[in-house]
Image (spheres, rainbow, N blue to C red):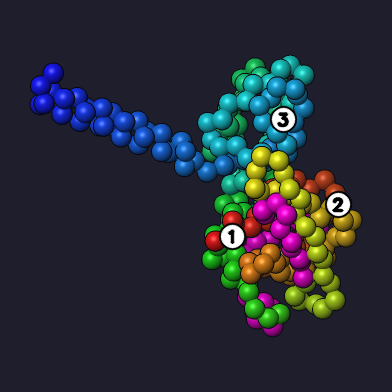
Amino acid sequence: MDEGARMRTATTSALAMASALLCAAPALAQAPVALVREVHGAAVGVELMDYVAAGKVIRLGPQESIVLGYLGSCWHETIKGGIVTVGAEQSEVQGGEVSRRKVMCNGGKIALTPGQANQSAGTTVRALHAKPALTLYGLFPVVEAEGGAAMSIVRVDREGEYHAANVPMKRGTRRAFFDFATTKRALAAGGTYRANIGSRRILFLIDPDAKARDVPIISRLLRFPPAS
């Protein structure tokens, strides 16, 4: 093979590789659209509190089931059996049964940017005049952050209420969840609070009609972005 042929071959290979990488990039960059709330089955392929992206296919046996909470559309789905294809706003289910209901959640605002997570830093006086970034619809927040992170939640519209906990570690991932229901100390309906992890702050409101029981996680989810 002469030098010109070798150069043409190398160029063709490089273009093919670049094309493959460009095609793969959207899939790699795809953001999660739903959170797995419950799993009943041995080989479903997802676990409790996993995030799933649009296009994910989950195969359920006749007696297997899964509960998904959609972060943007606020659909809460219970699916039994069949082939489940995760969509952008809801699932497509073939050969199975699905029941879904609309719940209160923050929609696309569930995931805060680092800038939003710091917007309420400062004194309680300043926080009182700031607008909460999120509204939670349950009295027990579920906080997502780095495993092992020390966090606190302080009420800012009234003195004397303070909660502290450590986010547990989860094998195989740096991110984990802490459900304040495990502390059995409910926040106050209608209260304004500031969640703190290190220098990161999130100001949020508990909805005046918030309840303590049977509230989906997407309705009470507080997600801290990774530390910068």
Q: Is residue 93 above or below residue 167?
A: above
Q: Is residue 130 magenta?
A: yes
Q: Inspect the image, locate mark 3, and give the three-letter code of the amino acid beneath it.
A: Ile
Look at the image and tell me whether residue 3 can be seen.
yes
The residue carrying pointer 1 sits among few (fewer than 14), some (14 to 19) or many (20 or more) residues within 10 Å by Cα, namely few
Which comes sooner in the sequence, label 3 or label 1?
A: 3
- Spatial distance from mark 3 to mark 1, Cα to Cα? 31 Å
Q: Secondary structure at mark 2?
A: helix
Q: Inspect the image, locate mark 2, and give the three-letter code of the amino acid beneath it.
A: Thr
Q: Inspect the image, locate mark 1, and give the three-letter code of the amino acid beneath it.
A: Ala
Q: Is residue 18 above or below residue 209?
A: above
In the picture, the disc for residue 66 is 3
In the picture, the disc for residue 182 is 2
- Image-based side of 228 in relation to 22, left or right: right
Name the residue tied to disc 1: 227
Please say if the residues under marks 3 and 1 sit with CB atoms less than 8 Å apart.
Answer: no
